[in-house]
Structures are given as structure tokens and as C-alpha cells.
Image (cartoon, rainbow, N blue to C red):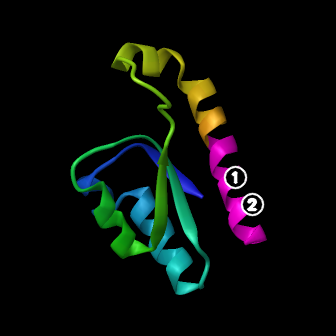
């Protein structure tokens, strides 16, 4: 599991998500990302080993609210992500 504040086309150019994705892919380990938001071209990261992206923002909110609630939003997003991973392991 990896992540960044915002996934977009820049995530594929030497940033942490790209590096983690490539290293995991080389070792046959599935990698997922938890991000604050997704922008244009975020899906390009799938070419670098990241299998899925989940965002933390769980409803309509302005940027200030997202920043003010970041800790809880990331925590709740991680819970949702791990629950989904656990479900996948059961299937």
C-alpha cells in the first residue's frame, strides 16, 4: 500500500507511487494506493504496477474541509481499503 496527496499524470514521473508500484510488480506483489484525490491522468499509474486507487474524500467538500479533516479521512479511507482487500482475499 502506498499513496500521495493527489494522484495525477505526474505520479508516473519518479514519484513514490511509481517506485513502489514498479518494485511490487517486479516481485509479484499487488500494490494499491490511497490518495486524497485523483486528477487528470491518474489512471496512468496502473501501467507502473499500482492495481487500484482509492480516495480518502468520501463526499462533496471543499479543499479547506478536506485539509481540516485529513487525518480522519485517511484513517477511514484506509479502513475501507483494507476491508476491500480482505473481501478480495475471501473471494
In the image: residue 55, left or right of residue 27: left
Extreme residue toward the right, this view: 90
Where residue 83 sits in the image (x, y, percent)? 71, 51
Side (left or right) of 54 relative to 14: right
| Real-space Cα separation, disc 1 to disc 2, in angstroms | 6 Å
**Please, is residue 52 above or below residue 67 in the view?**
below
**Residue drawn 55% across the image and 75% down it:** 24
As drawn, is 5 to the left or to the right of 8? right
Q: Position of residue 2 (x, y in %)?
A: 54, 55
Q: Mark 2 points at which residue?
A: 86
Find numbered disc 2 in the image and state the secondary structure of the residue it sits on: helix
Screen quadrant of the C terminus: bottom right
Q: Give the range drawn in magenta.
A: 78-91
Q: Which of 68 and 58 is in front in this view?
A: 58
* 80 versus 14 height, above or below: above
For the N terminus, the quadrant is bottom right
Q: Looking at the picture, how far across and down is residue 22, in whole percent?
A: 45, 75
Residue located 58% across and 73% down the image: 30
Was residue 17 drawn as part of the magenta stretch in this picture?
no
The answer to whether mark 1 and mark 2 are in CB contact below 8 A is: yes
- Indicate whether 5 appears above or below 3: above
Q: Which of 9 and 13 is in front in this view?
A: 9
Q: Indicate the position of residue 79 as horizontal and vertical percent values.
A: 69, 42
Majority SS type along the magenta span: helix
Residue occupied by mark 1: 82
The foreground one among 54 and 6 is 54
Amino acid at each position: 500500500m502506498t499513496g500521495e496527496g493527489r494522484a495525477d499524470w505526474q505520479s508516473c514521473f519518479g514519484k513514490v507511487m511509481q517506485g513502489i508500484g514498479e518494485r511490487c510488480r517486479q516481485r509479484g506483489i499487488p500494490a494499491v494506493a490511497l490518495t486524497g484525490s485523483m486528477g487528470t491522468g491518474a489512471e496512468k499509474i496502473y501501467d507502473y504496477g499500482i492495481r487500484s486507487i482509492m480516495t480518502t474524500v468520501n463526499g462533496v467538500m471543499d479543499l479547506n474541509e478536506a485539509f481540516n479533516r485529513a487525518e480522519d479521512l485517511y484513517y477511514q479511507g484506509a479502513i475501507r481499503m483494507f476491508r476491500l482487500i480482505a473481501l478480495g482475499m475471501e473471494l
